[in-house]
Image (cartoon, helix red, strand yellow):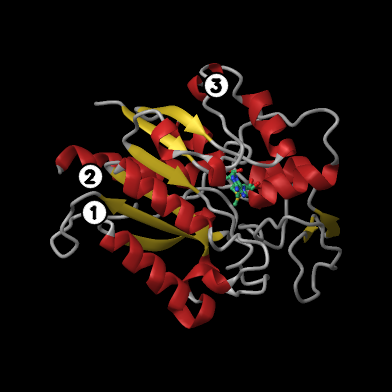
């Protein structure tokens, strides 16, 4: 199969890189502004071409599209606080922290570099922020840039990983006729393991875990808004960081820097993308590109 070059604009700790590593995809640039996320990324991907070739910039806002190495596919998970159900949901109107506007920087790179395809991921709340207005704007902007625009809400547990985590995946192909497109998102696959395996227990009140959030939340297991407590072998148990790592579908070999605080690790995990979701969606994108 042909190899495709990709860039990842908000690489965090490298969930996309993990999901794409066994596909015919070659990373030519990753970009991440957060110092601590960069440390984790570097601890896990010291030999990735973007690191070796010094194509690991910090701020997308300062990235000149003409400096980006040639690539075929743009991937990324723009910061989602502006759109998350838990956030203010101001969407593209959010001018307080500029985060909603990251889509415009992505769009600018797409317009200048015209990759064959893009794959973006965001919180489900993006679909309904501002009564759906933000999403309609994003949809129209990408269509007007010459791309088809497909989207679907996919759960972690649709991809074999026992976490509810609902994320909207958006995929577009350059010059594709939207109406006649045969692109399909992946069908759900069976769970690879359940919360019983995560906790190594006989009984657990859930097979599929709650969505991992970026901050600690001290609720009891029957309280509303509990995202961390489970009933494990009849005893209340708060999910640990190493169990959280499993529920994000990260391999045992994935490491965090030794001096990284648990709150920073939690934030990085909660911000992350499940690599199995990346792999399944990207496989469909590659299949489609081969048949176009
Ligand atoms: C939703 S997270 C993506 C996490 C990633 N998918 C992973 O697996 O870890 C968004 C990331 O965008 C980064 N970010 C925010 N503003 C940025 C900017 N201006 N340039 C580059 N990265 C930025 C944040 O630090 C955060 O790590």
Where residue 54 is drawn, which disc sits there? Answer: 3
**Residue positioned 55% across, 21% down in the render:** 54
Q: Is mark 3 within 8 Å of ligand 1?
A: no
Residues under labels 2 and 3: Cα distance?
Answer: 31 Å
**Cβ atoms under marks 1 and 2 closer than 8 Å:** yes
Q: Quadrant of the N terminus?
A: top left
**Within-10-Å neighbours for mark 3: few <14, some 14–19, many 20+:** few
- Residue 48 coordinates in the image, percent (x, y): 52, 21
Residue furthest to the bottom: 131
**Residue positioned 44% across, 28% down in the render:** 27
Please state if 2 lies on the left or on the right of 204 as rendered. left
Task: Write down the residue under mark 2.
Answer: 288
Answer with the quarter of the image where residue 212 lies.
bottom right
Q: Is mark 1 within 8 Å of ligand 1?
A: no
Task: Write down the residue under mark 1.
Answer: 183
Mark 1 or mark 2: which comes first in sequence? 1
Residues under labels 1 and 2: Cα distance?
Answer: 6 Å
Answer with the quarter of the image where residue 243 lies.
top right
The answer to whether one can see residue 206 in this image is yes
- Residue 70 coordinates in the image, percent (x, y): 34, 29
**Residue positioned 34% across, 64% down in the render:** 141
Q: In the rendered image of this protein, does residue 198 appear above or below residue 256?
A: below
Q: In the rendered image of this protein, does residue 157 appear above or below residue 259?
A: below
Mark 2 or mark 3: which comes first in sequence? 3
Query: At numbered mark 1, what does the secondary structure look like: helix, strand or loop?
Result: loop
Please state if 26 lies on the left or on the right of 240 as rendered. left
Q: Nearer the viewer, residue 162 or 232?
A: 162
């Amino acid at each position: 199969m042909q190899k495709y070059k990709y860039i990842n604009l908000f690489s965090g700790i490298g969930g996309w890189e993990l999901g794409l590593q066994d596909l015919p995809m070659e990373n030519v640039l990753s970009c991440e502004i957060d110092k601590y996320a960069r440390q984790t990324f570097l601890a896990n991907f010291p030999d990735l071409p973007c690191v070796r070739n010094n194509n690991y910039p910090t701020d997308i806002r300062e990235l000149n599209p003409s400096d980006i190495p040639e690539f075929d596919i743009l991937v990324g998970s723009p910061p989602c606080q502006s759109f998350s159900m838990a956030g203010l949901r101001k969407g593209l109107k959010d001018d307080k922290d500029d985060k909603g506007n990251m889509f415009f920087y992505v769009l600018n790179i797409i317009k200048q570099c015209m990759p064959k395809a893009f794959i973006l991921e965001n919180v489900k709340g993006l679909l309904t922020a501002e009564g759906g207005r933000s999403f309609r704007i994003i949809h129209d902007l990408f269509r007007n840039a010459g791309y088809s625009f497909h989207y679907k809400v996919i759960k972690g547990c649709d991809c074999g990983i026992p976490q509810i985590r609902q994320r909207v995946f958006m995929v577009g192909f350059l010059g594709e006729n939207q109406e006649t497109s045969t692109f399909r998102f992946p069908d759900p696959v069976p769970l690879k393991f359940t919360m019983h395996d995560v906790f190594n227990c006989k009984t657990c009140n859930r097979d599929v875990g709650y969505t991992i959030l970026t901050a600690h939340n001290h609720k009891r297991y029957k309280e509303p808004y509990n995202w961390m407590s489970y009933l494990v072998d009849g005893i209340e148990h708060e999910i640990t960081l190493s169990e959280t790592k499993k529920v994000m579908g990260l391999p045992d070999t994935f490491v965090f820097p030794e001096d990284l605080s648990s709150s920073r690790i939690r934030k990085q995990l909660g911000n992350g993308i499940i690599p199995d979701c990346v792999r399944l969606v990207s496989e469909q994108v590659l299949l489609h590109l081969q048949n176009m």
